[in-house]
Image (cartoon, helix red, strand yellow):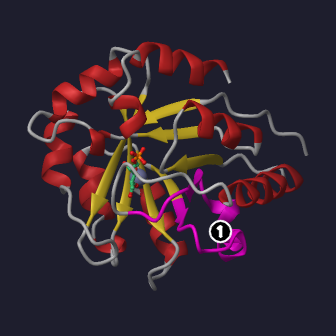
Amino acid sequence: MTVVPHPPILAPSILAGDHANLAQSARLAADTGVSWIHLDIMDGHFVPNLTFGPQTVAALRRQSSLFFDTHLMLDEPQKYVEAFAKAGSDLISVHIEPAFDHGAALTRIRALGCQNGIVLNPDTPAESVRHLLPIVDLVLVMTVQPGFGGQAFRPAMLDKLSILDAWRKRDGLAFRLEVDGGIDLATGAACRQAGADTFVAGTSFFNSTDRSGFARTVASW
Ligand code: DX5
Ligand code: ZN
């Protein structure tokens, strides 16, 4: 089966924005022409850091029409998918590592009117999500250990991307393949070569002196 490849999407991560003025950070991103923004939700259990919850997402929803790519780094994400859907998330992704009914949570996310995604930590093999590929809109390959921005990209993740891309092509599946962690124009280009089509960039994007040029470059991949 032939599936048309997805055009590249840049999803700036607001984790690297101004947390006293998230709406302004979302505007900075939107002004470069991107259509997505990545929202990192951390619970202090699954990852050793805390960010914000559905109330903040709902407030941001009133200030931004960007596509909200919501990355739940939670031990029990199934308890919160409804709250994030109601808050205005467009896509909600959950990790494969914690023990809960992943299939049910992914189905529930779609029933709530959102796209769904499954996320793999760097040490988690591609095989662990293989059975879920037919029911997901996106697979997020973490290219750092989640919890903090500004970490170094792990080149070993390129092989995992190639494996997932090969399965996608072979089975005629249409999920997006996203990367998150240490992504800049060099590491992102390498991920694009390996099959990624959706690029989360926090530090490199918000610290860039030419954010519009950054966005144009990703769009050209
Ligand atoms: C890390 C988060 C990332 C983070 C990436 O746990 O999932 O989305 O914002 O930040 P950078 O791009 O700085 O590595
Ligand atoms: Zn993230």
Callout 1: few (<14), some (14-19), or many (20+) C-alpha neighbours within 10 Å? some
Q: Which residue in the rendered view is the most extreme toward the bottom?
A: 99
Vertically, is 133 above or below 152? below
For image coordinates 49% across by 47% down, the residue present is 182
For image coordinates 66% across by 34% down, the residue present is 189
Q: Amino acid at mark 1?
A: Leu
Residue 63 can be seen, yes or no: no
Vertically, is 93 above or below 189? below
**The image quarter in which residue 118 lies:** bottom right
Residue 102: x and y in percent read 51, 75
**Residue 75, magenta (yes or no):** no
Residue 181: x and y in percent read 48, 51
Q: Which residue in the rendered view is the most extreme toward the front?
A: 152
Q: Which residues are magenta?
A: 118-146
Numbered label tally: 1
Q: Which residue is mark 1?
A: 132
